[in-house]
Image (cartoon, grey):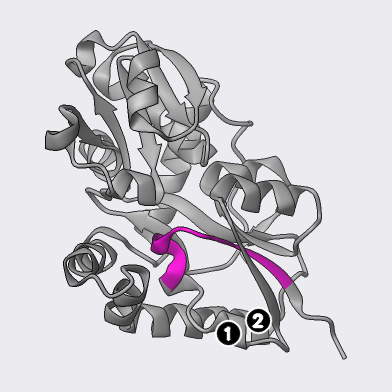
Amino acid sequence: MTAPVRLSAVSFVNARPLVYGLTEQRALFVVEFDLPSVCAARLHAGEVDLGLIPAVEYLNGDYCLVPDMAIGSDGPILSVAVFTSVPIARVTRLAVDTSSRTSVALTRVLCANYWDIAPEFVPMRPVLGEMLVAADAALVIGDPALAIDPATASVEKLDLGEAWRALTGLPFVFAAWAGRPGALGPAHLRALADARDRGVAAVDKIAMTHAAGDETRAGTIRSYLRHNLRYQFGDRERAGLERFFGLAEAVHAVSPARPLRFF
């Protein structure tokens, strides 16, 4: 009997539609949940066979991507943003949440190509108050970013998905399933596709579970999952990811770009 595939999935709510029901597929998968950067580190170390990794981490190993599945946006994403206490043109120090190297690389691309600034980047844990003591602006991602009310925090929120779309006209791929060639068989690929389809259809249930029954918070999460996130990886997403790799390489934010390969 073939051993189950060891799978590291992102712990944020935005990944839940991609892993819906996978924990019950014990003959195919052993599922664990980690921060995006930890998913990548475990895949690079060979501790897991498949990881839902930040997109730039694809360039750091001999990997294939699972076709037609990703976490991305085609416009505002809400959960990946720079929060700034001064006009963006005046930002000289930018604190960055290191939970995802893709978001940090995208921020570098946007600073160079969209906002026309060259701030010092300061890695910090994602606590906005602490970050804004050390810097003029802060990159925060995932559930912590969703929880920040810009009005209450007296900051401007600059959505990175929206800025990327304004710069390129393309969707952005933040994360995707990746593993070494041969790690998955047809049954694994079918199960991953089925989980994504069931998860997208179960957004209401996912939102209510994550909100622990708080209907107001559930409504926010439901809208986020349904309207801000995209879970497909088609031709436009591929073009967006290839464009990003090229721009990120130009600002020395990623390893050298290489062609995309799929299982």
Q: Can residue 234 be seen in this view?
A: no
Q: Which residue lies furthest to the right in this view?
A: 1
- Name the image quarter holding the N terminus: bottom right
Residue 183 quadrant: bottom right
* Left-right relation of 214 to 243: left
Q: Which of 233 and 200 is in front in this view?
A: 200
The x and y percentages for residue 157 are 20, 34
Question: Which residue matches tag 1?
Answer: 191
Q: In this view, does 107 lie above or below 195?
A: above
Q: Give the range drawn in magenta.
A: 6-16
Q: Is residue 200 above or below residue 151?
A: below
Q: At 70% across and 55% down in the image, what residue appears?
A: 63
Amino acid type shown at disc 1: Ala
**Element assignment for label 1:** helix
- Magenta stretch containing residue 14, yes or no? yes
Whether the residues at callouts 2 and 1 have beta carbons within 8 Å, the answer is yes
User: Mark 2 to mark 1: distance in Å?
Assistant: 5 Å
- Magenta stretch containing residue 249, yes or no? no
The x and y percentages for residue 59 are 64, 42
Question: Which residue matches tag 2?
Answer: 188
Residue 163 quadrant: top left
Amino acid type shown at disc 2: His
Q: Is residue 139 visible?
A: yes
Q: At 11% across and 35% down in the image, what residue appears?
A: 151
**Element assignment for label 2:** helix
Q: In this view, does 236 lie above or below 149?
A: below
- Name the image quarter holding the C terminus: bottom right
The x and y percentages for residue 8 are 64, 62
